[in-house]
C-alpha cells in the first residue's frame, strides 16, 4: 500500500480491462477513476488534475495520441505523467508516443505487477525531479540545467522540454565527453527494464537538439555507438 493516495485516471474503452485496472489500483492503495472515451477523459482531467494517467491509444472519438498532445500543450497538465496502454507494439507507435511526451509505454497483454511497478517508477521519478534544491545546477557553455527545478536555459532564455528530453539532457551533460550508447541513455532515463528502439532514442535527441537552438551542437553523434555531450565548451 502507498502512504498517500495518488489520483490515477484510467482511460480505456475495453470494459473488462477498465474494470480490472480500477479494481487492482484501488486494491493497491490508489484513488482511481475511469473514462471510457477521450471526451470523458478530458472533462475529468479539466475538473481534477490526476497525479498520473493510464491512457489507451485506441479510443473512440478523440484517440490517445491526440489526448496526449493536448495535455502536453496545456500548462496545467504539461507535467502530468502519462503511461500509454495499447495492443499495438509497432515501432512507429512507440516513437510517436515518446515524441508527444509520454513517460512510459506498455503493450497489451501486460502483467498488472509490471504495470504497477511502472506506475510507481514514473511517480517516483517525477517526485525526485520536483524536489527543491539550489545546489544541483549544471553550467555548460551557454546552457544552464537545474535538476531540482527541472529547468533549462539557453543563452539566458528558458526553454520547455518534455520529461524525457530533460532526463536525456541531464544524463549527457552530467558527464561531458562520455559516450553513451542508446541503451545507456534509455537506462539512465527510464530504467533497464524499459524496452525501446534505437529509433525512439534518435527521435528524442533530434527533438532535444531542435529546442536547444544555438546550443544544439553541444550534443554530438558518435557514429555506430551513440551520443556524447561536448567537453570543450
Image (cartoon, rainbow, N blue to C red):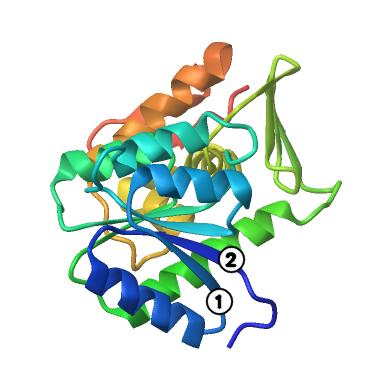
Residue located 31% across and 37% down the image: 62
Closer to the N terminus: mark 1 or mark 2?
2
Specify whether 210 is left or right of 36.
Answer: right
Taking the image as shown, residue 131 lies to the left or right of residue 12, namely right
Residue found at the far right of this picture: 134
Element type where label 2 sits in the image: strand
**The quarter of the displayed image where residue 207 is located:** top left
Q: Say whether residue 21 is left or right of residue 176.
A: left
Q: Are marks 1 and 2 in contact (CB under 8 Å)?
A: yes
Question: Residue 93's spot in the image, x, y percent?
Answer: 21, 42
**Residue 230 bears which disc, if any?**
none
Q: Secondary structure at mark 1?
A: loop
- The quarter of the picture where the C terminus appears is top right
**Mark 1 vs mark 2, CA separation in Å:** 6 Å
Image quadrant occupied by the N terminus: bottom right
Q: Quadrant of residue 187?
A: bottom left
Neighbor class of circle 2 (other Cα within 10 Å; few <14, some 14-19, many 20+) is: some
Q: Which residue is mark 1?
A: 30
- Residue 225, percent from left and from top: 28, 41
Question: Which residue lies at the image location 32% right of the left edge and 32% below the top edge?
Answer: 203
In this rendering, position of residue 135 left or right of residue 181: right
In the displayed structure, would residue 61 be above or below residue 10? Answer: above
Question: Residue sitting at 44 percent across and 51 percent down?
Answer: 103
**Spot occupied by residue 136 in the image (x, y as percentages of width and height):** 77, 47
33 lies above or below 227: below
Please name the residue that numbered disc 2 is placed on: 7
Please name the residue shown 39% across and 31% down the image.
205
> Which one is nearer the viewer's eye here, 193 or 82?
82
Q: Is residue 175 visible?
A: yes
**Is 198 placed above or below 214 here?**
below
Instruction: Looking at the picture, tell me which residue is in the foreground, 75 or 233.
Output: 75
Amino acid at each position: 500500500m502507498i502512504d498517500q493516495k495518488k489520483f490515477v485516471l484510467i482511460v480505456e474503452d475495453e470494459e473488462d480491462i477498465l474494470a480490472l485496472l480500477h479494481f487492482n489500483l484501488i486494491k493497491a492503495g490508489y484513488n482511481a477513476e475511469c473514462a471510457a472515451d477521450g471526451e470523458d477523459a478530458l472533462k475529468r482531467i479539466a475538473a481534477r488534475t490526476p497525479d498520473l494517467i493510464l491512457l489507451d491509444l485506441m479510443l473512440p472519438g478523440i484517440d490517445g495520441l491526440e489526448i496526449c498532445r493536448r495535455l502536453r500543450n496545456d500548462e496545467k497538465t504539461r507535467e502530468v505523467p502519462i503511461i500509454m496502454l495499447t495492443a499495438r507494439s509497432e515501432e512507429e507507435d512507440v516513437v510517436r508516443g515518446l515524441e508527444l511526451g509520454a513517460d512510459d509505454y506498455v503493450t497489451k497483454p501486460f502483467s498488472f505487477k509490471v504495470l504497477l511497478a511502472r506506475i510507481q517508477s514514473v511517480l517516483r521519478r517525477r517526485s525526485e525531479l520536483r524536489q527543491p534544491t539550489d545546489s544541483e545546477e549544471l553550467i555548460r557553455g551557454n546552457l544552464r540545467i537545474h535538476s531540482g527545478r527541472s529547468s533549462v536555459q539557453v543563452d539566458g532564455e528558458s526553454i520547455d522540454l518534455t520529461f524525457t528530453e530533460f532526463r536525456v539532457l541531464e544524463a549527457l551533460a552530467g558527464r561531458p565527453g562520455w559516450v553513451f550508447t542508446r541503451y545507456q541513455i534509455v537506462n539512465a532515463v527510464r530504467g533497464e527494464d524499459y524496452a525501446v528502439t534505437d529509433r525512439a532514442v534518435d527521435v528524442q535527441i533530434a527533438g532535444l537538439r531542435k529546442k536547444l537552438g544555438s546550443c544544439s551542437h553541444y550534443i554530438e553523434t558518435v557514429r555506430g555507438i551513440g551520443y556524447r555531450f561536448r567537453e570543450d565548451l
